[in-house]
Image (cartoon, grey):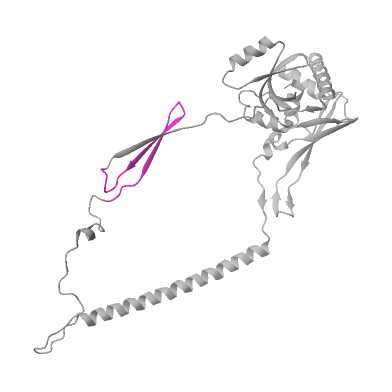
Amino acid sequence: MNRVIRHSEYLIQSNDCIIMPGLGAVLAHDESARIDEATGMLVPPKRRFTFNSLLTQNDGLLASSIARCEGISYDAAMKIVNDEIESMRHQLVADGELSLGHIGLLRLDGDRMLFEPYEASSLTPGLLWLPSVRVIPLSERVKAEVEASEEGTRRHVSRFTRLMRTAAAVAVAIGLGFVMSTPVTTGNAQFASLAPDVVKAPSRATESLFERPGMSTSPLVLVLRHHEDAITTVDTTVTTPASKPGTTVVAEVKKDMETALRFDENDRYCLIIASMATREEADRFIARNNKQQLGVLPKDGRYRVYAATGTTAAGAQSAAAELADRYPDAWVCRR
C-alpha cells in the first residue's frame, strides 16, 4: 500500500477531512444513536465516509504526517505525495477503479467519479465495542411481568394441590398399614394375614440393583495439555463397576493452525503484499516466505506479490485482516 493511503487511514481516525491534492477529499460524518423502527433495535453511534472530488486544494495535512513519520523535510514529503497521487490517478484511469485501503473504493463512470465506502468501524476504534440493543416498550414490559406473576401464582397453587393429595395418600397408607398389622385372636380358629410369613433374602438378580461400597462410579475427569506442536492431549479417567479405577484414555486432537484464504488465479482482484522491480526479486521474496501460498502479478512495469484473491475488491480486502500481523501494508489491486 502506498504511503498516501496508509497515512489517510491513520489521519481519518482523528480528522473529519483528508485532502488528497489533485484527486479529492475523504470526509467523515458522525451519526448519532437512533432507534430502528423496523427492528426495534437501538443502533449505536457510528461514522460513515464520503468522497468529494472537488476538494483538491492541498492543505498540507498528508505531507506533514509523512514528514513526521519518516523524518524528512516537508518539501521531500510533498514530492512523495504528488508522485503517489499521480500513480493513483493513472491506475484509476487504466482500471476504472481505485482502492483506498480500508476507507473505500473509487470508480469511474464516464466523467463521473463514484465512491463506495467500506464499513467505518475498523477506522473508528472508539465505537467498536458499542453493540445494538433491543428496546422494549414499558407497556410490553409491564404486561410481561404481570403474566409472569400470574403464571407463578398458578404454579404455586398447583404445587400446593399436589402436596395435599400426596399427604392424603400417605395418611391413608399409614392407616391401612396400622390396621393390617394389628393381630386379632379368635380362639382355635385359623387367622389370616395379607403380609407374607417369610421375607426371602434378595436374589443375585436383585443384588445387582443395589450399590455396594467401592462400586460407586467416579466422576469423569478431562485434562487438556497444550503442546508447542499444536497437539492437545486429552486424558480421560473413567471408573465403572466393570473396570478398575485409574483406567486412562488418551486422545490427541490436532488443531488447524492456518486459516484458509481464497486464492484463485481467475479472480479479478489481488491482495498485494509486496511490489518488486524485477521478477527475480519477486521470486526471492516468495522463496523467503514459502509457508504462505503466494503469486506474482506483472503490471505497470512492476512485479507484485499477492497472498489472496477475491471476485470483488471488498472480498480481497477482507483477507487483509487475516494477514495483518505479517503484512500490515497489504492493498488491493485489479488484474
Q: Is residue 77 above or below residue 131?
A: above
Query: Is residue 115 shown to the viewer in this render?
Result: yes
Q: Is residue 249 above or below residue 269?
A: below
- Locate residue 91, reporting x and y percent: 81, 22
- Locate residue 28, reporting x and y percent: 79, 36
Residue at (59, 14) in percent of width and height = 288
Residue reaching furthest to the right: 111
Nearer to us in this view, 256 or 164: 256
Residue at (69, 52) in percent of width and height = 41
Q: Is residue 194 above or below residue 29?
A: below
Query: Is residue 240 shown in magenta?
Result: yes
- Locate residue 20, reporting x and y percent: 82, 25
Nearer to us in this view, 261 or 275: 261
Q: If the image is split into quadrants, where does the N terminus sit?
A: top right
Residue at (77, 35) in percent of width and height = 117
Question: Splitting the image into 4 quarters, where does residue 252 fall?
Answer: top left
- Locate residue 3, reporting x and y percent: 74, 21
Boundaries of the magenta span: 216-244
